[in-house]
Amino acid sequence: MHVPRPPRASTARGSDRARETLRILTENITSGRWPLNSRIPTESELMAELGVGRSTLREAVSSLTALGMLEPARSRGTFVRSLSPVSALLSDFIGSHANPEILQVRRLLEVESTRLAALLRTDEQLERLAAAHERDLNDDQSQGVVRGATPGEFHAIILEAAGNSLMADLHAGLMRGVRTAMARGEMVPQISAAERLADHGRILDAIREQDPVRAAQAAADHVDHDLTTAG
């Protein structure tokens, strides 16, 4: 189905142009023109399409990143991670809860989403999941101790394959809270990058075989030793 190109923002001025650019980018996400987990056009492509400068475009992208709708990936571009700003709103609420409770809810969401992904995934989603895992294996940053806890492409595709958008929004908001806790030193990683990637490999194998029991167990094992509360 043909999707019409969005209007250019060049007729606006100053702050009006910035707001219009943000509106257009948001509409591209919420309308499905940029599907969940897809990579958005490059900066130069968007500047030409919208008729705006680099600073205006970056301001809009930064706003959507802060809302959890976009996620930059080094050397890979910027990806759509949520179709709504719900995750950012949830993170404020989640942050008011004790860290052990946050990790317990993370376990519930990741185990169930992985189980559902094993049952419901498409061949195309499996192909993307395997490719994401392969990129992680080849990433220079995959050496040493894990320093972050973003859902990343691997977990985002699992959540997509689970077919539950509410679960995906809840998880995105939860992980924003986890990153905040880690930045404060309140949560710390317990495993190396090699161990994390081995966990992901077991999850991938179970999803590939469409074995929901093994997939859920692999996800539970991963979450149980991934992070812990400090102190």
Image: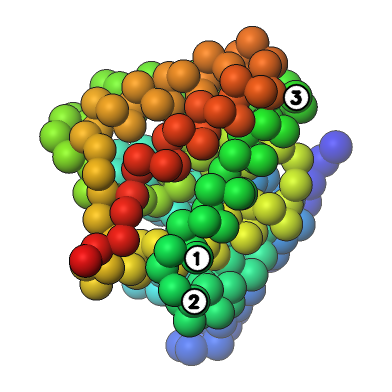
The quarter of the rendered structure image containing the N terminus is: top right
User: x and y percent of residue 189 in the render?
Assistant: 26, 49
Mark 2–mark 3 Cα distance, whole angstroms, equals 32 Å
At a point 68% along the width and 23% down the height, the residue shown is 212
User: x and y percent of residue 60 in the render?
Assistant: 47, 71
Image mark for residue 101:
1
Q: Earlier in the sequence, mark 3 or mark 1?
A: 1
At a point 48% along the width and 89% down the height, the residue shown is 15
Above or below for 179 versus 159? below
Q: Are marks 1 and 2 in contact (CB under 8 Å)?
A: yes
Which residue position is annotated with label 3?
119
Inspect the image, locate mark 2, and give the three-letter code of the amino acid beneath it: His
At a point 27% along the width and 68% down the height, the residue shown is 186
Mark 3–mark 1 Cα distance, whole angstroms, equals 28 Å
The quarter of the rendered structure image containing the C terminus is: bottom left
Mark 1–mark 2 Cα distance, whole angstroms, equals 7 Å
Whether residue 135 can be seen here: no
Whether residue 117 can be seen here: yes
Q: Secondary structure at mark 2?
A: loop
Q: Secondary structure at mark 1?
A: helix
Above or below for 159 versus 200? below
143 or 219, nearer to the observer: 219
Image mark for residue 97:
2
Extreme residue in the front direction: 231
Q: Earlier in the sequence, mark 2 or mark 3?
A: 2
User: x and y percent of residue 227 in the render?
Assistant: 33, 50
Q: Is residue 183 left or right of residue 218?
A: left
Inspect the image, locate mark 1, and give the three-letter code of the amino acid beneath it: Glu
Above or below for 183 versus 1? below
